[in-house]
Image (spheres, rainbow, N blue to C red):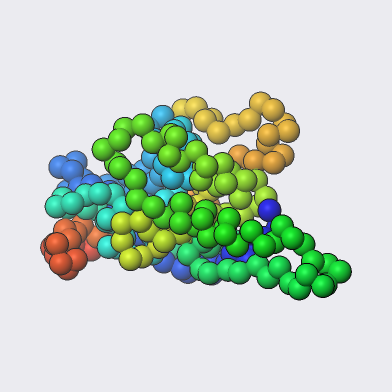
Amino acid sequence: MPYLCEYEKLIPTGEVFYRARKLTKELMDITKIDVYKELSPAPPLLASTNRMSPAGISYLYIASDIETAYEECRLKDHGALVAEYVAKQELSIIDFSQEAFICSGSIFDSNYDHDLRWINDFLKGFVEEITLPVDKENKELSFEYVATEMIAEYIRSIGYDGICFNSSVSKGKSYVFFCGPDKKYYDIDTYGYIDSYIEKYCPEIISFREWFNIRKLDRIHISKTYEIEDLIEYKTES
């Protein structure tokens, strides 16, 4: 799909993102947490169906701000552990949160392409689709997400590092980056390929640590008025 270039965006080195996790008893003492394990993408065997990835495929889902990261976890009135992620290098993404318009041109132009008259409606419909909230009480979301999962895999296959879209539950932006958990924590090479054809077009999923550092942790509770309460900060080692 050549029209995706209208949504291209370069994430600069040093860009900051956030990832939240429900605060449990085991995570209360943040000075004793293995940060790159506990705040990483989910282990493959525990990775559930998500908007841009099917069950068993673990990508990194992060947000533009703390409130969005908190809301995306549907934590309601629970405390949260929030990690501040920092991009270690430039990353090329498709940003569906920005507006794009494909000009079909004049019908009198020799290069006129009639198909371009509907492409804007298609792109607008797709962007709306990926930002619609879903019923999290529904345990089987594979059918609702299949279209966006397929588009995400296509975007990864043509060389982009991730996707940005407006959050369906907050005013911020959500990001999915095509990187997974650090393999040193797992015994199986989960993402290896047997078929060389597949490996050529969908390269092996790398560890998120190649693209990001976790700079600090915040232990927070967000009230109904979105005020951050009980902030405890702990800086990590990169």
Residue found at the very far front of the displayed protein = 108
> Residue 113 lies in what quarter of the image?
bottom right
Vertical order, 133 against 194 (above or below): below
Q: How many marks?
A: 0
Residue found at x 61% / y 50%: 155
The image shows residue 140 at horizontal and vertical percentages of: 36, 31
Residue found at x 78% / y 70%: 107
Residue found at the very far right of the displayed protein = 110
The image shows residue 229 at horizontal and vertical percentages of: 14, 64
Vertical order, 194 against 238 (above or below): above
The image shows residue 73 at horizontal and vertical percentages of: 28, 49
The image shows residue 226 at horizontal and vertical percentages of: 19, 66
Q: Is residue 104 visible from the viewing direction of this image?
A: yes
Q: Is residue 196 left or right of residue 165?
A: right
Q: Nearer the viewer, residue 81 or 56?
A: 56
Q: Is residue 237 left or right of residue 98?
A: left
